[in-house]
Amino acid sequence: MSEGVAVAGIYVRDQDEALEFYVKKLGFRVHTDAKNGDYRWLTVQHPDQPSFQLGLFKAAPPTMDESTAQTVREIVAKGAMPPLILHVGDCRAAFARMKGAGVEFTQDPVERYGTVDASFRDPAGNGWKLIETHKGGN
Amino acid sequence: MMAMAASKSGNGKGQGGITGQDPLLLRRLLRAKDKMDAAPHEEWPIPRLARASGASQAHFARAFKDAFGVPPHRYLLTRRIERATSLLRETELSITDIAFQTGWNSMGTFGRVFRDITGQSPSQFRARTKAVPQQPDLVPFCHLAAAHRPNLTIAVSEKRRLEEGDSVAGPEEKTEIVP
């Protein structure tokens, strides 16, 4: 595997808070955490997905001006960023584990369309759909 | 901490951004919106929504409207009608059952709000969508739901509101459905 998407990122309000959430509550691993002045390049990985990194980026200068950054922070906090989907083998088990860890669920597991799904948000407001994978497919 | 965030809410324009609202307040307002999304058939009076978001009752409706563009009660009505449209489209439930399942206590109110939002009656809507084959499997349903969400930039009760002549949150919250 050498070609494909390597990193896709989301905006978070606070990178420490996001790191705590994605690593301690969701079970991701830190891939890169590099600081350069005020800038911090932070990516995490799903343990079963070594070729993909999820970037946890802060909307702030110097990558954008303060007014634009404030706009981005508002959009994230209003839950208006694009959808994110996390596949799991057993949605109800993952729900129980994550809820126990303090994840904010916005929808309990529901069985429909031949699978089970739930919804949760990260502390910043990014919305995830938790979807049980079909056996042998997606 | 929470109280500080709330007190910076409201009309704090001029800090850049779109509404100038504190992201921490917006995140908590989102919690109230999520609660309505999860259970639109339930009653969501302002005190309950304010509690869900940890905001003061006095400022909640205004802050919610600033954040999401519509007053909370109007948002709830769109979600109910959205649920109703998908039940009309995807099930054989009777229109009466659908009305009660989506939180309406009165068929008259359901029909009127449904028509205000979609421009047609529930039975017209059902007849029209049943006539067109759907392929819901191809899009994750949550996004499908969003795509089918009735667009409510114009109020359900705009004309009632205009007739009554009033302030932002008042009559919206008074359109509580009674049998």
Image (tube, rainbow, N blue to C red):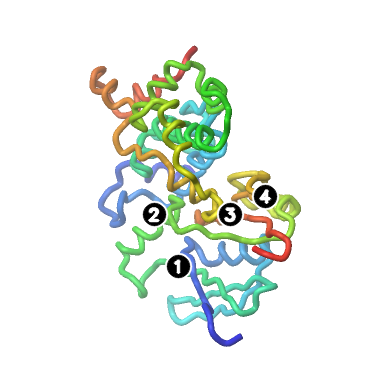
B58 to the left or right of A31: left
Which of the two labelled residues, at mark 4 and mark 3, occupies the earlier sequence position?
4
Q: Percent x, y for residue A1?
A: 61, 85
For the C terminus of chain A, give its image quadrant: bottom right
Query: Residue sitting at 65 percent across and 45 percent down?
Result: A112
Residue indicated by mark 1: A58
Which numbered mark, 1 or 4, is in the foreground of this view?
A: 4
Return the residue nearer the eye: A42 or B154: B154
Please say if B137 is above or below A62. Answer: above
Residue indicated by mark 2: A74
Which of the two labelled residues, at mark 3 and mark 1, occupies the earlier sequence position?
1
Query: Tag 2, which chain?
Result: A
State the SS at label 4: loop
State the SS at label 2: helix
Check if mark 4 and mark 2 are on a common chain: yes
Q: CA distance from mark 3 to mark 1?
A: 22 Å
Q: Is label 4 in contact with label 2 (beta carbons under 8 Å)?
A: no
Q: CA distance from mark 4 to mark 3?
A: 15 Å
Q: Percent x, y for residue B56?
A: 45, 34
Check if mark 4 and mark 3 are on a common chain: yes
